[in-house]
Amino acid sequence: MRDYELVAIISPEVDEDGVSEIVEKVTKSVNSHGGEVEEVKKWGRRKLAYPIDSFMEGEYLLARLKLAPNSVRGLEEDIGASGDILRYLMVKVDG
């Protein structure tokens, strides 16, 4: 398994409980693909550099996880299917 970092921007219309539910869904998705979430940090609401779906703010989330390389595509499909996640980026961490 390799180390990855996932940064997601969640719609500002989602309340704090909704953000916790999204974190739980992402964790379950990682686990269902044979990985594990090591750490989740909520960065809070931040201003966006440009509008995304007419929003100028978003809730930022950082997750550090371990996942097999062949499971990345499936996880990205699960994350992309969520209507509350405006954008996400998953990168492999070297080291």
Image (cartoon, rainbow, N blue to C red):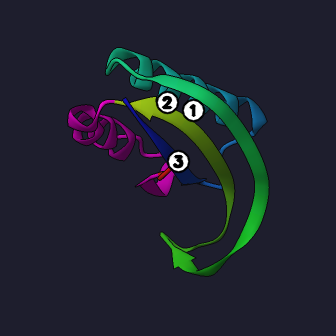
Number of marks in picture: 3
Relative horizontal placement of residue 48, taking residue 72 as reference (left or right): right
User: Circle 1 sits on which residue?
Assistant: 22
Q: Quadrant of residue 33?
A: top left
* Of the two numbered discs 3 and 1 in the rendering, the one whose residue sits closer to the viewer: 3
Q: Nearer the viewer, residue 27 or 5?
A: 5
User: Circle 3 sits on which residue?
Assistant: 5
What residue is drawn where x is 39% and y is 41%? 79
Q: Nearer the viewer, residue 33 or 54?
A: 33
Q: Is 90 rendered above or below residue 35?
A: below
Identify residue type, mark 3.
Glu
User: Circle 2 sits on which residue?
Assistant: 26
Q: Position of residue 47 (x, y in %)?
A: 73, 73
Magenta-colored span: 68-92
Relative horizontal placement of residue 39, taking residue 75 as reference (left or right): right
- SS class of the residue under badge 3? strand
Q: Quadrant of residue 72?
A: top left
Relative horizontal placement of residue 24, taking residue 83 as reference (left or right): right
Q: Position of residue 85 (x, y in %)?
A: 49, 49
82 drawn magenta = yes
Whole-Å distance between the Cαs marked 2 and 1? 6 Å
**Numbered badge on residue 48:** none
